[in-house]
Image (cartoon, rainbow, N blue to C red):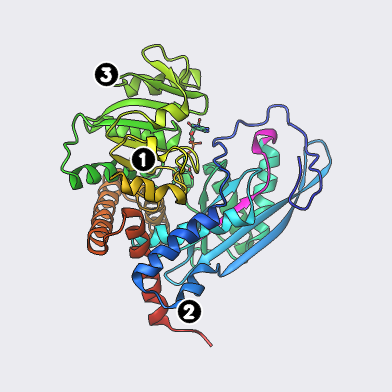
Amino acid sequence: MSSPIGETLTYPVAKGGIRPEKDTFLGGENPLESMVARFDEAARHLKLEPGLSKVLKHPEKQLIVAVPVLMDNGETEVFTGYRVLHNTARGPGKGGIRFDMQVTLDEVKALAAWMTWKCAVVNLPFGGSKGGVICDPSTMSMAELERLTRRYTAGIIDLLGPDSDVPAPDVNTNERMMAWIMDTYSMQKRHTVTAVVTGKPIAMGGSLGRREATGRGVMISAVEALKLRNQPVAGTRVVVQGFGNVGSISAELMAAQGMKILAVSDKEGGIYNKNGLDIKEVLAHVKQHKYLKSYAKAERLSNSDLLELECDVLVPAALENVITKDNAARIKAKIICEGANGPTAADADPILHDAGILVVPDILANAGGVTVSYFEWVQDRGGYFWDEETVNSRLEKIMVSSFAECAVMSQRSKVSMRIAAYMVAIDRVATVHRLRGMYA
Ligand code: NAD
């Protein structure tokens, strides 16, 4: 294994190392270029001042830290960690922490910017940030991961805080790591600070409904998209790529709305039944057998064939860059509702738009997760916790109104929903910059 500074990482595959909770979602494209391409188009439509455009393209802060960790075999390994604050004009930075061998500074910068736009689309009082450590958690023991998480937290602690930068889980990190971040930060501050991180266990300040929030937001976005197209919800044929947190919960909640889930997939491939899958049964199967492939009441198909199935709604909820200029013309879905971050490469956008496919972009469709993270932060700061019904109904209100704002922008400016969502977001951030003015 090679580190970004060219040294060989020697840390061993730990016996009994944990299975990563999340997989690697990295495609070939530079995500920063994809982000900038969409930003530039939206900025052009908004006639954004060139100076402000420059400000909004540059991250406010980029921190690179060396993270020394004592490994279980007694050797010391040094990992590289990043934390990027893209923009904090509207409030504290908000963004996940990713543990993955593919983490790069460019990727973290792009993801931090996407968080700025995502928070602004749903009008949360947050800016955007992101963090990552180059490591392979599948080869590390729990104890090594705890030491890595704590030392990385100590390395970036000057940026963190409920009023400055609030991390959350992302690829290969989970509520366990969020608990360690909260503890490390709190020990340094000499008092418990629950609001420094979201996606925590419920027992220590997490929010009810957070686990399901992204999938719930995807389902709500799909329903709104169907209404926009005057399509009935019941009987809608849905295909979902990825059957993890986002994909499986989206499928379950969409099925509960009366939609017919034709196919779902994981990294081992997909399963398809033209009459619709029994999602509860599929979920039970995955719980027992881990992967979908041995599920009997369906045909098997590849992930690339799955994307090209005849359906009404396609939900890519696994990887980045799965829809590109190479396969965009073969997509038959009428609506694409992006559960994953960055599933569509920028070069596929015009092909999908010209084909009349309505794409509900990631920064809108998967914003349910950060919205309930915001609720978690509010509940922690208020010290008063809401029941699940309150969480879900407030989430629905925000998703429905945000969708409507983007749809109006799309119609008014004659642009795709993606560019409209960027326009809504950039306009909100730019307005605050204009009102605040330039310091010094
Ligand atoms: P997860 O690890 O729970 O699930 C990922 C799923 O994708 C798994 O079923 C995995 O088998 C599958 N997968 C991996 N490689 C694949 C491949 N090559 N082809 C098809 N499927 C493959 O992750 P998640 O939390 O569901 O996140 C999925 C996506 O949604 C990511 O892009 C993530 O950044 C984004 N997202 C997640 C949240 C959240 O709250 N979890 C919020 C916003 C965005």
Q: Position of residue 169 (x, y in %)?
A: 52, 47
Q: Circle 3 sits in a helix, a strand or a loop, which is it?
A: loop
Q: Give the amino acid at mark 2.
A: Gly
Q: Is residue 246 above or below residue 204?
A: above
Labels 2 and 3 touching (C-beta < 8 A): no
Q: Earlier in the sequence, mark 2 or mark 1?
A: 2
> Which residue is disc 1 drawn over?
215
Q: Position of residue 121 (x, y in %)?
A: 35, 60
Quarter residue 307 falls in: top left
In this view, the residue in front, 46 or 404, is 46
Work out how far the residue at label 2 is from the one at label 3, CA to CA, in angstroms.
55 Å
| Disc 1 residue crowd, few under 14, some 14–19, many 20+, Cα 10 Å | many
Q: Earlier in the sequence, mark 2 or mark 3?
A: 2
Question: In percent of the image, x 62 and y 45: which residue is there?
Answer: 99
Give the label, 3 or 1, closer to the camera. 3
Question: Does the residue tagged 3 have its C-beta within 8 Å of any atom of ligand 1?
Answer: no
Question: In percent of the image, x 51 and y 85: which residue is there?
Answer: 439
Q: Give the amino acid at mark 3.
A: Asn
Q: Circle 1 sits in a helix, a strand or a loop, which is it?
A: helix
| Disc 3 residue crowd, few under 14, some 14–19, many 20+, Cα 10 Å | few
Question: Does the residue tagged 2 have its C-beta within 8 Å of any atom of ligand 1?
Answer: no
> Which residue is disc 3 drawn over?
275
Q: From this viewpoint, which residue is outermost toward the right?
A: 75
> Which residue is disc 2 drawn over?
51
In this view, the residue in front, 330 or 96, is 330
Q: Give the amino acid at mark 1.
A: Gly
Quadrant where the N terminus sits is: top right
Is residue 70 among what the camera can see? yes
Chain part drawn in magenta: 129-141
Q: Circle 2 sits in a helix, a strand or a loop, which is it?
A: helix
Based on the picture, tell me whether residue 259 belongs to the magenta stretch: no
